[in-house]
Amino acid sequence: MSDSTVTNPNEKPPASDSDPSAASNAESSGGMIDPNEAVSPVAEIAMAPDVANVRRSSDPSAGKSQLTLSNLRPRMVRWRRQLARVNDFEPILQKEDDATIRKRSLALRYRAMAGEKLSTLLPEGYALCREAGRRALSMRHYDVQIVGGIALFEGHIAEMQTGEGKTLTATLPLYLHSLTGKGAHLATVNDYLAKRDAEWMMPLFEMLGVSVGIIQTPDDQGARRKSYSAAITYGTAKEFGFDFLRDRLLLRAQNRMQTEMLGGGDGGFSDSGDQVVMRGMHFCLVDEADSILIDEARTPLIIGSIEDNVRDQIIETYSWAADHATDFELDEHFEIDDETKRYELTAKGRSKVRALPKSDLVRTMGLVDLYEYIERSIKVHREFLLNRQYVIRPSEKDPKIDEIVIVDEFTGRLAEGRKWRDGIHQAIEAKEKIEISVPTGQAARITVQDLFLRYPHLAGMTGTAATSARELARIYRTPVVRVPTNRPPQRKQLTSRVFGTLQSKFEAIAKEVAEVHATGRPVLIGTRSIDKSVLLSKLLDDLNIEHEVLNANNVEREAEIVAAAGGIGKVTVATNMAGRGTDIKLADEVESLGGMHVICTELHDAARIDRQLIGRCGRQGDRGSYRQYLSLDDDILKGGFGQVKYDKLKSRGEATSGSADQLANMFHRAQRKVERRHFRDRMVLMHHEKERKKMQREIGQDPYLDTPD
Ligand SMILES: Nc1ncnc2c1ncn2[C@@H]1O[C@H](COP(=O)(O)OP(=O)(O)OP(=O)(O)O)[C@@H](O)[C@H]1O
């Protein structure tokens, strides 16, 4: 394919700022409820519809895309000018053949390598990317995507509604930054998405002569090195972090850290044969930025080392505590602090611990430690439930051994390779009577925050950053801008329903599913845990409604289930793994029936997770609707208001028949409380990490390698 049949009549500069047809901010927020909307420091861009895409065959007289501004911030004026320059290139590039496009790309690379500023190369670079997208993928970057791409290049977090094409937008800053030859990384949440997005966008990059590498968890060092040597590398945040740590350990072993730390090293080679895999950190674009930069920021990435000589003693004490955890009664033997959620033994509880039978090994443990083991074990027995927070499955390394795999609350996926901290993971293993993986000491660790702050150029994309805008700006110095949708969203919110108990709520949900199902519209139901997805599935079976269940237990079939979920009459029950990165394509007839209907069965700890699920419908301006179902025994009420108030609400719920929809706001209040608590936790973690690093630097240690447990 060389010459394009599409001509571009855009010859005039874009229209004025005050275009009345510009999409309003309300439209650009997707009509969704955002409790923090009023206070969120998110910059808004308002744009007129990108007529060039729509016009292609139908309206040859349509003018150039117009960008209007909701305010006159200088950066937005600049972005508008840049968009105009990108658009100016379009008619020229469209007339050129593939080889010329590639030559142009090569010329840009030489200019970038010669030191020309990337911002000067942006208009031609983005226009080339757009042209390559149009030819190789049949997707021409919309104007809103170009502006999103400019915001990303300038180190922002771009909030783009779900389904607006973040994958394609990412190609713009990745391509531009790759020109300097220092490597551009795209960090996403899991291997599946890294591979899918890279392979999807590959033809575009190939057309521009840009190499792409993909990092997957099982890759060996050789494969990793090759992927990092590509101009653009897709991978998960976790793998980027582990590779950074492994390289650092290697460099220290080879005594090369000093130069590295002083900035002299370029991550090159060693004499001993072993080589680092990364070639430094230059630019990283973080997909699902809120999830990676905020949710995951709480768990540090750790590489273990050194066998612990008191391992046996520790293992035995975990088992001992697990055997006795249920002997302890709330209030009599232990208390739970409402604010901190800490479990603390009472005087009576402590004396009970002292009186418990103990083996010789357990007896040699300090008493204070024994109290802690018991407190932790009680907590685990009460709060960590099989098939909710975790599943048990044969270990990948050794299938004869079972292991605990965390179900990520935020993504609904199995969080491979992750462990709870502070002995929680081991206490759960003891409770489940499987092999206890006592930590072996840390060789290296890094928090997600530190990892990304090491990139001199950082940007992010997300569907739902508004609620985290302050935090993102504060920690990463990445301002959030909201990019409007290409077409006005048509997603309808139906009134929330509140019920007394989970049972009555689920029955009402099943009824609604049956009603919508009868119209032929596809229905997607999101549940907060695997066991609830199973419960709902049983209810649907009772009503003879054919459906699919998508949860962390059947991840192999995910692609197949998702591909079918938008078909006529399809019903899909999913844990919130369907909330991210899943593009559900609607069958043609579905749009005229009203699009997909999404049912949220519970609020999540963070409002943005709910918004992710809702974002499965009404994508790219499609029609769609959603409804939130709640009940007085929902976990969010316990998290937000504490056990005592929760118990009261629960008993009130048990006495309630029918619905109590007027209480819906209370649930959102509870959610905001939980969000605030998590925010405080993250700030405390950040503060401690900062102090620790400062102290270690003062005594000449490496904060990533010389890590206390
Ligand atoms: N410029 C474009 N032209 C044509 N189709 C597009 C364009 N941009 C995006 N799309 C289509 O929009 C759909 C959504 O894209 P994508 O999966 O990248 O969205 P997303 O923003 O990542 O959504 P989510 O937040 O749900 O992951 C895809 O089917 C893609 O093909």
Image (spheres, rainbow, N blue to C red):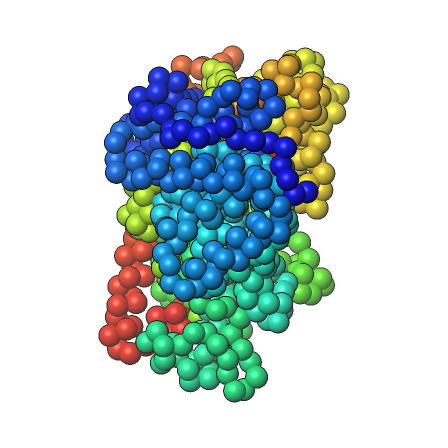
Residue 347, horizontal then vertical, whole percent: 32, 54
Look at 37% across and 50% down and name the residue there.
119
Residue 472, horizontal then vertical, whole percent: 34, 46
Q: Nearer the viewer, residue 531 or 383?
A: 531
Is residue 209 something one can see in this rendering? yes
Count the labels in the image: 0
Above or below residue 154? Residue 65 is: above
Quadrant where the N terminus is found in the figure: top right
Quadrant where the C terminus is found in the figure: bottom left
Q: Quadrant of ligand 1?
A: top right
Q: Nearer the viewer, residue 424 or 208?
A: 208
Left or right, 201 with respect to 652, comes to: right
Above or below residue 253? Residue 383 is: above
Look at 50% across and 68% down and name the residue there.
278
Q: Nearer the viewer, residue 408 or 287?
A: 287
The residue lying furthest to the bottom in this view is: 271
Residue 511, horizontal then vertical, whole percent: 63, 16
Look at 35% across and 17% down and name the residue there.
20
Residue 85, quarter of the rendered image: top left
Q: Nearer the viewer, residue 591 or 95?
A: 95
Residue 224, horizontal then vertical, whole percent: 58, 66
Is residue 612 something one can see in this rendering? no
Look at 52% across and 31% down and name the residue there.
8
